[in-house]
C-alpha cells in the first residue's frame, strides 16, 4: 500500500470525487426532467443521457474504489472521537454502496425494459429479453434507492459543512485541490 503524509487526497481522487458529484447531480436533474417530458425522440435522448451519466458514475466509482485500495487516506483530525471516526467510515461505505447500487440497478432496469445504452462511440445492447414487469420492479427499487442516496449525499454535505464552519478542523480541505504553489507531500 502506498503511504502518504498528505493532508489531502491526491489530485486524481479529488478530481474523481467532484466529477462523480457533478455526474450524480446531472443524472438526478435529468431523471426529474424525463418524468415531465412527453414521449418523444427528445425524451428518448434525455433518457439515454441519464443512462450514460449513471454508467459513468458506476465506472468512476469502481476506479476510485481501486485507487482507494492502493492509497492511504489523509488522517482524521487528532481529536476525532473514535465513535465519530466509525460513523464516518460507515457513512462513506454507505455512500459507496449507493454509488454502485443505484446506477447498477438503473442499468438492469434499462436492460429489462429492452433498452441499451448508447455512449456515442459504442453501444451496449440489452443482454436480457424485454420484460416490462421485471423492468418496472427494478425501476421502483432504483428510484427508492436514489432518494436514499440523495438523503445520504445531503448528510455528507451537511457533515462536511459542520466540520468546515463549526469545528473548523480543516477536514473539508482533504477534498479540495491544492492552490498552485502550495506544497503537499504525496
Image (spheres, grey):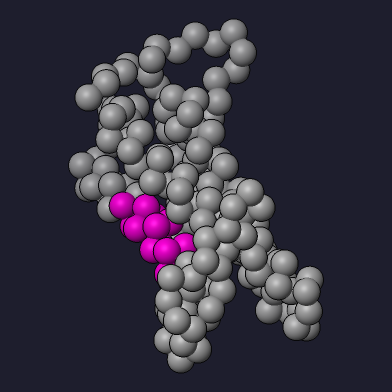
> Is 110 within the magenta?
no
* Magenta segment: 93-105
Instruction: Report the residue that reaches farthest toward the bottom.
Output: 133
Tell me if residue 37 can be seen.
yes
The N terminus lies in quadrant:
top left
**Which residue is found at the position 75% from the left and 83% from the top?**
39
Left or right: residue 24 compared with residue 81? right
Taking depth in this image into account, of 136 and 18 the one nearest to the observer is 136
Taking depth in this image into account, of 35 and 55 the one nearest to the observer is 55
Left or right: residue 84 compared with residue 41? left
Image height check: is 42 above or below 17? Answer: below
Where is residue 98? Give x, y as percent: 40, 60
Prevalent SS, magenta region: helix
**Which residue is found at the position 53% from the left and 78% from the top?**
114
Where is residue 166? Give x, y as percent: 49, 41
Image height check: is 64 above or below 35? Answer: above
Left or right: residue 37 compared with residue 93? right
Tell me if residue 139 can be seen.
no
Number of numbered discs present?
0
**Which residue is found at the position 57% from the left and 42% from the top?**
19
Where is residue 78? Give x, y as percent: 28, 27
> Is 100 within the magenta?
yes
The C terminus lies in quadrant:
top left
**Which residue is found at the position 37% from the left and 53% from the top?**
96
Where is residue 104? Give x, y as percent: 42, 64
Amino acid at each position: 500500500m502506498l503511504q502518504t503524509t498528505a493532508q489531502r487526497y491526491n489530485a486524481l481522487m479529488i478530481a474523481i470525487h467532484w466529477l462523480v458529484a457533478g455526474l450524480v447531480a446531472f443524472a438526478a436533474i435529468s431523471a426529474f426532467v424525463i418524468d415531465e417530458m412527453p414521449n418523444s425522440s427528445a425524451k428518448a435522448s434525455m433518457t439515454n443521457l441519464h443512462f450514460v451519466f449513471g454508467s459513468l458514475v458506476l465506472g468512476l466509482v469502481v476506479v476510485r474504489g481501486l485507487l482507494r485500495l492502493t492509497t492511504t487516506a489523509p488522517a482524521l483530525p487528532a481529536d476525532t472521537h473514535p465513535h465519530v471516526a466509525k460513523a464516518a467510515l460507515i457513512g462513506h461505505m454507505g455512500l459507496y454502496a449507493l454509488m454502485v447500487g443505484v446506477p447498477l440497478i438503473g442499468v438492469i432496469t434499462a436492460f429489462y425494459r429492452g433498452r441499451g445504452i448508447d455512449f456515442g462511440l459504442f453501444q451496449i445492447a440489452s443482454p436480457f429479453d424485454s420484460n416490462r414487469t421485471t423492468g418496472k420492479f427494478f425501476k421502483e427499487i432504483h428510484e427508492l434507492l436514489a432518494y436514499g442516496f440523495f438523503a445520504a449525499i445531503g448528510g455528507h454535505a451537511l457533515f462536511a459543512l459542520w466540520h468546515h464552519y463549526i469545528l473548523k478542523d480543516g477536514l473539508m480541505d482533504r477534498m479540495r485541490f491544492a492552490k498552485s504553489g502550495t506544497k503537499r507531500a504525496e
